[in-house]
Amino acid sequence: MSDSTLNFPRTIGIDLGSRTSSYCTVEPGGERIDEGVLKSDWLKMQRFFEAQPTSRVVIEASAPSRWVSEVAASCGHEVIVANPREFRLISQSDRKSDRNDARLLASYGQFRPRLLRPVQLRGVKCQCVRTLLAARNLLVQQRSKTITFVRSQVRNLGFALPTCASHYFHIKVADQIPNALRSALEPFMEVLVSLAEAIRKYDREIARLCKEEFPETAALMAVNGVGPITSLAFVATIEDPSRFEKSRDVGPYVGLAPRSRASGSKAPQLSISKRGDKGMRRLLVSAATFILGPRGEDSDLRRWGQSLQDRGGQASRSKARIAVARKLGVLMHRLLVSGECYDPNRRMQHTAA
């Protein structure tokens, strides 16, 4: 993509909405030649794009941006999907409206498209995988909340339920609920049984996907602490490893890059940016926690993380965990790109956390 629009007779900026979308069309010189509102449905969008000469279409990344971009591309248009964070910074104004946003998208798409920091939309296959993983995670969260509620109610009567893994809770404590609470808590125990079965079904499907449709996950699972869920999520999130010029670019992509605020000659390191994919960041941090924990196997990554922890204090442990999570993302990307087998003792290039 270049900033030049000589190959496009016009640029169309569209501010997408769930029901209606505002659009603005500009000529190469920047003159607005058409504005309006159209319904946000597939047929109306298709008719609209079919009626346009080959154009550059600029939209902001949002829920409908995937199918809208597919419709526009199928009609022969170039599509730019603007990074919503960058566009919000550009479009801050007291006169903000759907029409003005459409005008801005058209204007920047015409003259300065790079300022929109275009993003790459995921393919349908990877998006479906991410939906499956998100659905499983939601059920896991519901199970945790239900268990917490049951424990708190039993504790209120002066009793305590035994400690056990969440997926065994409904089995281990079923006969230890006080009789006075059975009628009230029995429906919750039934919910836990249903949640456990649903989560097991997801786990079986995840295992099948790893084996049959995403065999590259096997190389990632060779890393201690990386299981089917983390490896499949990583592949579906990264999707095309070649779009990252360097493996270390994965850190900022998932929000694990440290922020810094320069002041004079000093540039103190602050917390991580958290700008990227929240779910993938959570999984990488969880894997890093395992790697640095008592069950983590010896590896160059673990030894490096422990050296960061040894600096002392809770802050050092937290920084070490984030640093290992970031380095793990870099390692996993390199494994995808190179196709090499993981060697836990191969020394990686390490930089200060």
Image: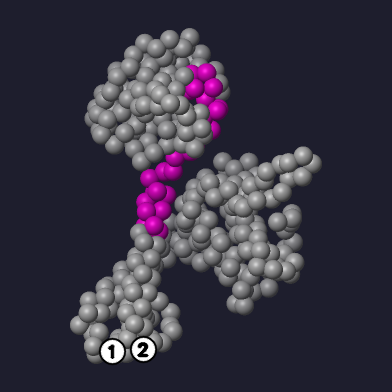
Disc nearer the start of the sequence (2/1): 2
Residue 314 lies, in percent from the top left, at 65, 68
Residue 109: within the magenta? yes
Quarter occupied by residue 180 = bottom left
Which residue corresponds to the image point at 55% horizontal and 27% vertical from the top-left? 114
Measured as percent of width and height from the top left, residue 98 is found at: 35, 27
Q: Is residue 20 left or right of residue 130?
A: left
Residue type at mark 2: give it. Phe
- State the residue lying farthest toward the right: 265
Q: Is residue 167 left or right of residue 237?
A: left
Name the kind of residue labelled 1 in the image.
Pro
Stretch in magenta:
108-134
Q: Which quadrant of the figure contains the C terminus? A: bottom right
The relative height of residue 104 versus residue 153 in the rendered view (above or below) is above
Q: Quadrant of the N terminus?
A: top right
Residue 252 vertical placement versus 173 (above, below): above
Q: Position of residue 45 (x, y in %)?
A: 28, 28
* Residue highlighted by disc 2: 159
Q: Is 257 covered by the magenta stretch? A: no
Q: Quadrant of residue 296?
A: bottom right
Residue 178 circle label: 1
Colour pattern of the rendering = one colour
